[in-house]
Image (spheres, rainbow, N blue to C red):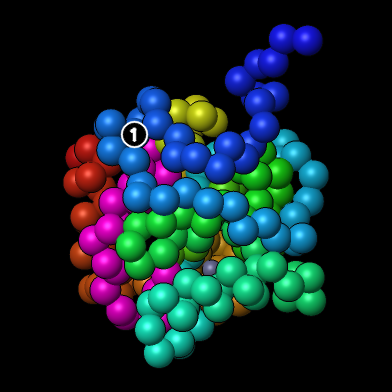
Amino acid sequence: MAVGARDRPPFSGRPVGGAGSDGWIPPRVFDSLSPNYGPARPKTVGIIIHGTHGGADTLEREFAGTLNWFGNVASAVSAHDVIGPAGEIARVVPDHLIAWHAGALNTSYIGIEVVHRHPLESVPEPTFRSLVWAIKKYAVRYGFPLINATTPYHSETSQGVSIGKVDLFPRGSSEGKAFRAKIRAALGIS
Ligand SMILES: [Zn+2]
């Protein structure tokens, strides 16, 4: 049976290059599967950018703690990818399936978690580079334009506002605006 691009196994266990990657790939991509997911997402209009905000004492422990939490069925939460402090990407839910990261928006958005212990913490450069790589990859894969509206912080979404979310950065914060400007520059958004 011929296997199309959309039918290939979502987890290769290896970095994925190709369109949108600019030839740069994250230092490591690995699987850390979560039991918290739903069926195939009916449409994909963008990516919601989250911050983990677990308050761990190191970024490494923040990353590991997030993967543990997403791996626990009792948490009932997940995301598609979690990006660690060295730019490593843990793939938690296959990207064509529904991850549990933003309520009713789960059926139309990819969810990416950035290791981020506190609301105003700066994001490590390797983490930033992997985030940009992932955004470009999914924009090509699902065909949505790269504009602010397709890459909101969780705190900027209707669902995030409704429950008082402050990740990745608090809505309207100067830190959030500066990080947004950096994302726009890296994505070539004028
Ligand atoms: Zn969030």
Q: Could you tell me which secondary element the residue under label 1 belongs to?
A: loop
Indicate the position of residue 78 as horizontal and vertical percent values.
65, 63
Is residue 144 at all visible to an observer of this figure? yes
Is residue 180 at all visible to an observer of this figure? no
- Name the one closer to the observer, 113 or 179: 113
Indicate the position of residue 129 as horizontal and vertical percent values.
29, 51
- The residue drawn where x is 41% and y is 76% is 60
Quarter of the displayed picture in which ligand 1 can be seen: bottom right
User: Residue 167, relative to residue 117: is it above or below?
Assistant: above
Quarter-of-image position of residue 99? bottom right
- The residue drawn where x is 29% and y is 68% is 123
Indicate the position of residue 92 as horizontal and vertical percent values.
62, 56
Please indicate whether residue 149 sits to the left or right of residue 178 in the image.
right
User: Residue 17, relative to residue 61: is it above or below?
Assistant: above
- Name the one closer to the observer, 58 or 122: 58
Which residues lie in the magenta part? 115-136
Residue bearing mark 1: 21
Please indicate whether residue 146 sits to the left or right of residue 124 in the image.
right
The amino acid beneath tag 1 is: Ser
- The residue drawn where x is 32% and y is 80% is 120
Q: Quadrant of the C terminus?
A: top left
- The residue drawn where x is 72% and y is 36% is 42
